[in-house]
Amino acid sequence: MSELISAIVPCFNEEESLPLFYAEIVRVAGEMKSTYGAEFEFLFIDDGSKDGTLAILRDMHKRDERVRYISFSRNFGKEAAMIAGLEGSKGDYCVILDADLQHPPALIPQMYEYVAKGEYDCAATRRISRKGEDRLMSFFARSFYKIINRVSDTEIVDGAQDFRFMTRQMVDAIIALPEYNRFSKGIFSWVGFNTKYIEVENVERVAGTTTWSFRKLFLYSLEGIIGYSTAPLAISSWLGVLFCLVAFVMIVVTVIKTLVFGEPVKGYPTTICVLCLVGGLQLLCMGITAQYISKMYLEVKGRPKYIKKETEADGR
């Protein structure tokens, strides 16, 4: 019996990219069938697109029964799209890749070989350059990986992408994690399994424009730090100890200067500055704690990670 590979493709406003992507993935699937005897299913996740993405997916399904799709009721984000694809997949292997061809389908045969031999459970790509990316965003991306690997016990490889080819065992382990606030780069590492990283150059989108902004990437990085480290919570404790020591030293100095040297207590402007500094640090620590509480709040609500509006089974 031939092995089935599920190609999971999150889509958000990808009407320009989809025809180009489909032609390429079909070509690769044909090569893999003739070389390895592998079959494919193409599972597209429409993440609440506002353009003609869903209409294209409907038409593709009518022309090719291997094409399946899940359309969300609204935009839930790429993390929700990826887990929906994994949960809806039927393959012995799953590969996640973007519809804009920044994740070249031509790499799938190489990834398959690494995993099919049994030495690795996962093959993933890792960017070794950020050519074409904004310098400021590149700087903060590199800084993020340095920070999170210092404060977290889960190693997250610098430049690792979501383009991953995985065994069903690894996919089932990922699906078993129930959290609502998902950071897949951390999840992929946390579940373990042997991963082979393939170094690649940065590839530009084949069409359309990215929806990732600096603000979205910054919030996404905070999601990773909060989700995989409790180190920020220790900041308030360390700052508290530090300022207690500073305050004790200042009290001793003030008492000695007043009692021994007879100097009056001065420094009204300095006192105001210190109060503002301490107040700001207190608010910072409260804000960090509030971030963790907000994540707990969303988790305990038990809301679904996504809501399906339509699938290929609806026959529209």
Image (cartoon, grey):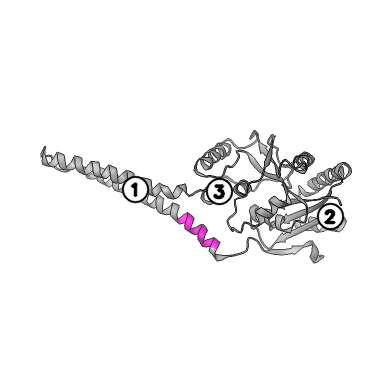
Which residue is at a point 28% across and 42% down the rendered structure image?
A: 246
**In this picture, residue 299 sits left or right of residue 76:** left
Q: Earlier in the sequence, mark 3 or mark 1?
A: 3
Can residue 109 be seen?
yes
Kindly identify the amino acid type of the residue bearing the numbered disc 3.
Gly
Which residue is at a point 39% across and 49% down the rendered structure image?
A: 236
* Residue hosting label 3: 224
Mark 3 and mark 2: span between their CA atoms? 35 Å
* Residue hosting label 2: 66
Residue 276 coordinates in the image, percent (x, y): 32, 48
Stretch in magenta = 290-299
Give the SS element for disc 2.
loop
Q: Is residue 148 magenta?
A: no
* Residue hosting label 1: 240
Label 1 environment density (alpha carbons within 10 Å; few <14, some 14–19, many ≥20)? some
Q: Earlier in the sequence, mark 3 or mark 2?
A: 2
Q: Looking at this view, is 30 or 234 the one in front? A: 234
Label 2 environment density (alpha carbons within 10 Å; few <14, some 14–19, many ≥20)? some
Q: Looking at this view, is 305 or 14 the one in front? A: 305
Residue 206 coordinates in the image, percent (x, y): 74, 42
